[in-house]
Image: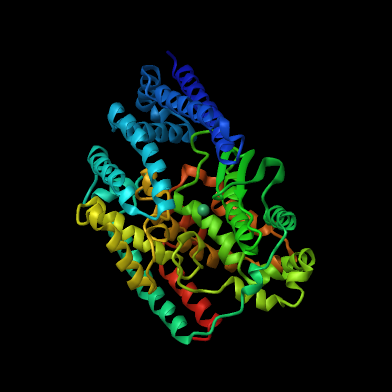
Amino acid sequence: MELESVKKSFMDRLSQIRGLEYAGNIVYWDLATGAGSRGIDARSRAFGVLSSQTQMMMMSEAFLSELEILELNINNLQAQDAMVVKEARYQLDRISKIPMNEYREYIELTSKATVAWEEAKSEADFEMFAPYLKEIIEYKRKFADYFGYDDHPYNAHLEDFERGMTVKVLDEFFEELKATIVPIVKAINEKNEQPMDDFLYLSYPIENQKAVSEKILYTIGFDKEAGALSESEHPFTLALDISDVRLTTHYYQNHLTSSLFSTIHEGGHGIYEQNFSDSIAGTILADGSSAGIHESQSRLYENNLGRSEAFWSYFYPELQSKFKKQLDCVKLSMFVEAINKSEPSLIRVEADELTYSLHIMVRYELEKALMDGQLEVKDLQSAWNDKMQSYLGIMPKNDAEGILQDVHWSDGLFGYFPSYALGNAYAAQIEIALRESMDVDGYLRAGDYAPIKGWLSKNVHQYGLTKTADEIIRIATGKPFNAKYYTEYLKEKFTKLYNL
Ligand code: ZN
């Protein structure tokens, strides 16, 4: 067969796979955003069927033989087609390293484990979940061997989220964070002067919260015509295509800023997904560079921009007009201080900007030790509590607000947490370059987001999966990744806020 027709057939297969994924994602969207509960089983089944279909297509003889022909002729392909071929090989290698039957058993285990985790969390009893976790970790250790790794088995799992990332790099990264953040947290605690923030927890009618969320989302640059904002228990972003990016948030009557910052956060993810270059749209390359780079875009909008005085000088009058009774006496400066309050807390997803990465550090150290066998599940609960005490100075009263709070482990997601902290650090470095190239605060005050979005699209978004995280940071900032931008950002911000 002619190379050209092999290529066409191969690309057709990839777009069929993408079509199936698209359908699976719509089913998932329905599952998560609350179609009638009686349909849950049917939707779960449909989702399972579609997922296994994509896997079967990718592992079919036809797919493999075309891939091999294209690999032999890789030098005769155009640059982007060559990248598609390499990416397809990469993904195929990952999924085919684990024997099918073991993978199926593992998936069954994680779905049972998720149910067990939910029950254990509602009873605040880690013992109910521990046997499942023990089995999941045994699989994960085995899978690390199948994937292969240098130095540390955890590296094999980091690969799913940050290609090329290693324990060696992360150990240094977290040491640097620990050395900076822990003393600031202590100093704030000793100073014992917190801004007033009780007004954030008055009753805020949800209809008005929705109106403000939407106003912010569409102003910061999320394209309304190419997406949707809905509601779910835990906010998330689901990208079906650059023309169809779905976001959710969660409104709480008595917590004004929870939904606002969730919307801005998911908005950052969504803007990233909407701005891949047209040339990679609809291909296997239309995906985030890494989980950390993805998180850098949500954090940049949520924290670096979204918690600034300049950001709210534009949006606060709107917020005040929607909630006259609640915010009439609250000045802009009081509001900005309140949304930047830092106080050690037990729950990661509610943590403030300063303490957030310490929550990640706890999970990183535990995951790493579970993976190399230095820690056993039976000792995990006390290890968790000790680390919370030593980094944050607080101890959970029960397992629901401690070791059972996150869904990730029941889902088998090991290696994901570090991306959250890396995202914060990438965002800090990117913010500096962004500010060097324009008057960011001036645009924020004017509510003019086009220049900021334009810069991010040009330097980060457009590339999708065609560049690694490391390359994106170099392109956007002109320098290699360095955690010191993040630690200096935190030091400067919180020293000033708390007059330390
Ligand atoms: Zn996120």
Q: Nearer the viewer, residue 350 or 1?
A: 350
Position above or below: 418 against 327 = above
What residue do we see at 37% from left, 58% from top? 399
Indicate left or right for 65 with 445 as reference. Answer: left
Q: Residue 237: where, in percent of width, then height?
A: 56, 46
Residue 162 visible here:
no
Q: What residue do we see at 53% from left, 29% from top?
A: 43
What is the x, y in percent for residue 407? 42, 49
Residue drawn where x is 35% and y is 62% of the image: 362
Which residue does the image show at 50% across and 54% down from the upper left?
Answer: 295
**Nearest the eye: 176 or 378:** 378
Location of the N terminus (image quadrant): top left
Q: Is residue 434 left or right of residue 123?
A: right
Q: Residue furthest top?
A: 1
**Can I make out residue 241 in this image?**
yes
Q: Position of residue 336 (x, y in %)?
A: 64, 74
Decide: is 310 above or below 243.
Answer: below
Disc tally is 0
- Image location (x, y in percent) of residue 143: 27, 39
